[in-house]
């Protein structure tokens, strides 16, 4: 049985794990660290996009807290900003799917970079280093 705090922590960690599991291989492909595979890319991009359409704020309600995660308390103090930055990620994920569907490698690489910037923008303020 999970109490509420454990549920919220588990929910958001699962969410970010799915983002990383889908984004990691796309990053590796555009960096040449993994063989380019258009079919796989389409799967990663569409799953990544699908995850970003789920409401991340379900993992960060009032009364939830950092727990054993690296979520900075600043998230709860700046919820609107956090939500907006997540919106930037979602917009970039939508554009990434479009780029992947085009099959144009340069556009895909550029858009993977753009998504990575939106990950980092949030991590800088809201993900603790330790
Ligand atoms: C990843 C991953 C992140 C982002 C970030 C991009 O693959 O797990 O959190 O890319 O490093 O700046």
Image: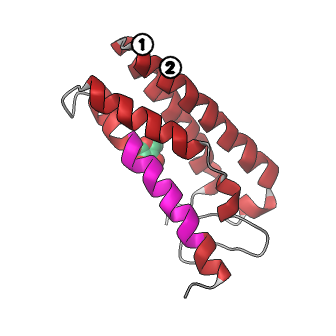
Quarter of the image for residue 17 reads bottom left
Q: For the residues marked 2 and 1, what is the alpha-carbon distance in whole angstroms?
A: 6 Å
Q: Which residues are magenta?
A: 9-23
Q: Secondary structure at mark 1?
A: helix
Left/right of residue 23 with respect to residue 122 in the rendered view: left
Asked if the residue under mark 1 is in contact with the one under mark 2, i.e. CB atoms within 8 Å, the reply is yes
Judged from this view, the residue extending furthest toward the left is 35
100 or 20: nearer the eye?
100
Judged from this view, the residue extending furthest toward the bottom is 1
Quarter of the image for residue 128 reads bottom right
Q: Specify the quarter for ligand 1.
A: top left
- Residue drawn at x 65%, y 54% is 56
**Where is mark 1, residue-wise?**
102
Left/right of residue 27 with respect to residue 19 in the rendered view: left
Magenta span includes 14: yes
Q: Is mark 2 within 8 Å of ligand 1?
A: no
Residue 93: x and y, percent? 54, 32
Residue 120 visible in rendering: no
Position of the N terminus by quadrant = bottom right
Residue 16: x and y, percent? 50, 55
- Residue drawn at x 28%, y 27% is 39
- Residue drawn at x 53%, y 41% is 50
Residue 108 visible in rendering: yes
The kind of secondary structure the magenta stretch mainly shows is: helix
Magenta span includes 45: no
Residue 75: x and y, percent? 71, 59
Q: Secondary structure at mark 2?
A: helix
19 shown above or below 67:
above
Residue 98's mark? 2
110 shown above or below 51:
above
61 shown above or below 109:
below
């Amino acid at each position: 049985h999970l109490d509420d705090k454990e549920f919220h922590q588990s929910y958001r960690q699962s969410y970010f794990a799915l983002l990383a599991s889908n984004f990691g291989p796309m990053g590796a492909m555009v960096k040449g660290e993994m063989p380019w595979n258009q079919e796989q890319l389409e799967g990663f991009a569409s799953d990544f996009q699908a995850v970003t359409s789920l409401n991340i704020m379900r993992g960060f309600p009032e009364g939830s807290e950092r727990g054993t995660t690296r979520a900075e308390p600043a998230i709860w103090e700046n919820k609107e900003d956090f939500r907006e930055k997540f919106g930037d990620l979602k917009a970039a994920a939508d554009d990434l799917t479009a780029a992947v569907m085009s099959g144009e490698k340069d556009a895909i690489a550029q858009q993977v970079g753009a998504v990575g910037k939106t990950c980092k923008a949030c991590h800088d303020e809201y993900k603790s280093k330790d």
